[in-house]
Amino acid sequence: MATNSNFNFTNNTTVTLELPFSEHIEELRQRIFLLFWIILLLTCVAFIEVKSLVKILELPISNVKFFQVAPGEYFISTIKISFYTGLLFSSPFVIGQLILFLLPGLTKKETKIILPLLLGSLLLFGLGLAFSYYTLIPAALNFFLNYSEEVLEPFWSFDQYFEFILVLFYSTGLAFQIPILQILVGLLNIVSAKQMLGAWRYIILVSTILGAILTPSTDPLTQLLLSLAILMLYFTGLGILFLLKN
């Protein structure tokens, strides 16, 4: 990491970190290297406790028996679970490293905006995971169980079950970033808050389409729940943008 840094202070409180491009690249490389070891460590910890994680993932559905198609299927699934758990719990460290990398080149005004946005992004991602775990996943699974209860016994492949809920987890987490994107676009004056409000009819259509695309299941209940969540997030972001602009 570079140690000899020159700072220029101007009367509009801009702080500029003057470093050669190669030193910026070196700093970025070191931060990525650090994040790699953090993710690896958390993945290893998750793998040690993977049976507890599997039980947590099975909680949304209680009356289903899981099986493995091949001898190594469960083992591969536990590696996937451990990796994505390590990736998830390393998110605060990723945000922290991003903040540390960006701070020297930002003005005080930009710093006041970027820090809440980054932390808000992390919080919204967590809320998206919780919404998916407690609402979307049980709704989707119960729909499929009720639909086939008089015809088929509920025996599911654990690997396919895990991939199903993984898609729901991350698609919902990403959908919950909508307010952050709105605020960024609005503060950069790319699209005004009034223009966003005026496009509410199109937003209803887009939220319906996104609900269908982002949910791995074909049941209408899950798609409707996600579409309603996207609409609520959009108007929440719009309200925050109006407050920031006024």
Image: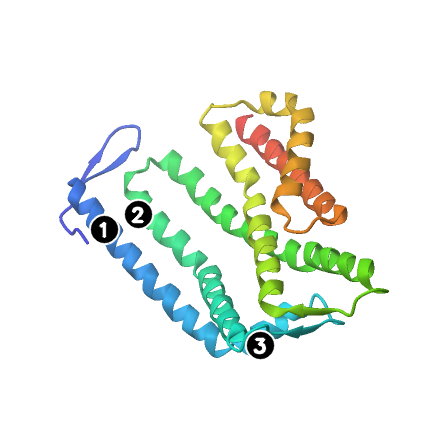
Which callout, 3 or 1, points at the residue further toward the start of the chain? 1
**Residue depth check, mark 3 versus mark 1: number of the one nearer the observer:** 3
Residue beneath label 1, please? Answer: 27
Alpha carbon distance from label 3 to label 1? 37 Å
Alpha carbon distance from label 3 to label 2? 36 Å
Q: Nearer the viewer, residue 24 or 47?
A: 47
Residue beneath label 3, please? Answer: 52
**Residue depth check, mark 3 versus mark 2: number of the one nearer the observer:** 3
Which callout, 1 or 2, points at the residue further toward the start of the chain? 1
Could you say whether the residue bearing mark 1 is in a helix, strand or loop? helix
* Whole-percent x, y for residue 220 in the image: 75, 46
* Mark carried by residue 77: none
Alpha carbon distance from label 1 to label 2? 8 Å
Relative to 149, is 218 above or below?
A: above
Residue beneath label 2, please? Answer: 101
Relative to 126, is 238 above or below?
A: above
Q: Nearer the viewer, residue 185 or 145?
A: 145
Q: Residue at x 47, y 23 (%)?
A: 189
Badge 1 vs badge 2, beta-carbon distance below 8 Å = yes
The amino acid marked with disc number 3 is Ser
Q: Residue at x 28, y 43 (%)?
A: 104
The amino acid marked with disc number 1 is Glu
Could you say whether the residue bearing mark 2 is in a helix, strand or loop? helix
